[in-house]
Image (cartoon, helix red, strand yellow):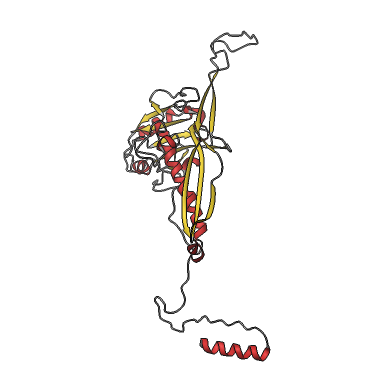
Amino acid sequence: MSATQKIIEAIKTSLHEGRKVNVDLREASTLTGSGAGVGGRTYFDDAFAALRFANPFRMGALQIKAPNMSAVQFVAKTGNALDQADPWGYTFTPNAGTPGTATNTWQLPTRVLSAQLPIRTAALDDINGLQEELMQDLTLEFSQAEAASMALNNDQAGSVTTTTGATAGLRGLSMYDGSTSAAAFGTSGNAITDGIHTILQVVTNATSPTYAQIVAMGDALPAQYWNMPTTAWHMTPKYIKGLRTLADDQGLPKFLELGERDGGAVGSIFGAPVIINPYLDDLYPVYLANWNRFMQIADVEEMTIQAFEQTAPGFITLWCEKRMASTVRDPFAGVRGVD
């Protein structure tokens, strides 16, 4: 029945029965061909965005909440409480021996990530699932930015490259001092130059690591951290690719995973899981750490999102903010490879 016929029949029914009649004027094509505008109506799928790589440091690092704080102070107990010369027996002699008990403190200001996102009001109404996808993608975009800053940023000097924050960003792992002999706490105090610890490191190759280098990194991590649940490797994709090419004299992969025939995944090494971390660079392409003790993230508050409807006619502007601080907590709990 055509649209005109439907209207006429509805009028007749309304006059005869004295009631309101709803008229469905939608028409379905009777054609059976294919192509745009032929064979039916258009279906609008939900909006989506390409998946982003979330912050892998949050998989194991210690995370705390510090609401409404402009700075976070970290305190570590150092030294020994026992009399190292003669700790046995009931005799207590004040000031005997060299226990050397002390504390090491450092303070970091909280840093802020912010974004503004203007959206046409009509687009939110017309596109299915757009608002939910915008929120999810923006959350992952924030996660990307914080991960890059935690890995690479130098908070001691300004830079023409501000993508990781420079003096307004987090204290990245790559800016900590390195030593091939021993780890150490940094200077103690409240200045921005305090708390730059020394991380134990092992020489490796960013793209072509050797089995001996991996063994050396495993040996460098103190034994007390190996049995902890968050002990894991963080590696760049290129470093993992180099490990996959390592083979023995028979051509079999050296890192053959239990239950896998090809051993290509490198899902774990020496019992510790391997986590892909694309935010690391070629200078320090691999870390082995007990992450719950090695790294700490302080989130000032949850991510704040607020909508402003009167910024421009026909637009809604989303304003987003996230504040945090991050630090190496225990420099003895991790080692890194240096190219």
Residue 201 left/right relative to 122:
left
Number of numbered callouts drawn: 0
The one of 332 and 218 positioned closer to us in this rendering: 332
Residue 174 position within the rendered picture, expressed as x and y whole percent measured from the top left: 40, 33
The image shows residue 61, relative to residue 259, as above or below, that is above
Residue drawn at point x = 54 percent, y = 90 percent: 5
Residue 122 left/right relative to 66:
left
Residue drawn at point x = 68 percent, y = 88 percent: 18
The one of 314 and 114 positioned closer to us in this rendering: 314
> Which residue lies most toward the right here?
18
The image shows residue 110, relative to residue 43, as above or below, that is above
The one of 192 and 105 positioned closer to us in this rendering: 192
Quadrant of the frame with the C terminus: top left
The image shows residue 201, relative to residue 59, as above or below, that is above
Residue 119 left/right relative to 101:
left
Image quadrant where residue 103 sits: top right
Residue 75 left/right relative to 193:
right
Image quadrant where residue 281 sits: top left
Residue 298 position within the rendered picture, expressed as x and y whole percent measured from the top left: 53, 36
Report if residue 60 is visible in the image. no
Residue 136 position within the rendered picture, expressed as x and y whole percent measured from the top left: 50, 53
Residue 29 position within the rendered picture, expressed as x and y whole percent measured from the top left: 46, 82
Residue drawn at point x = 51 percent, y = 40 percent: 323
Report if residue 51 is visible in the image. yes
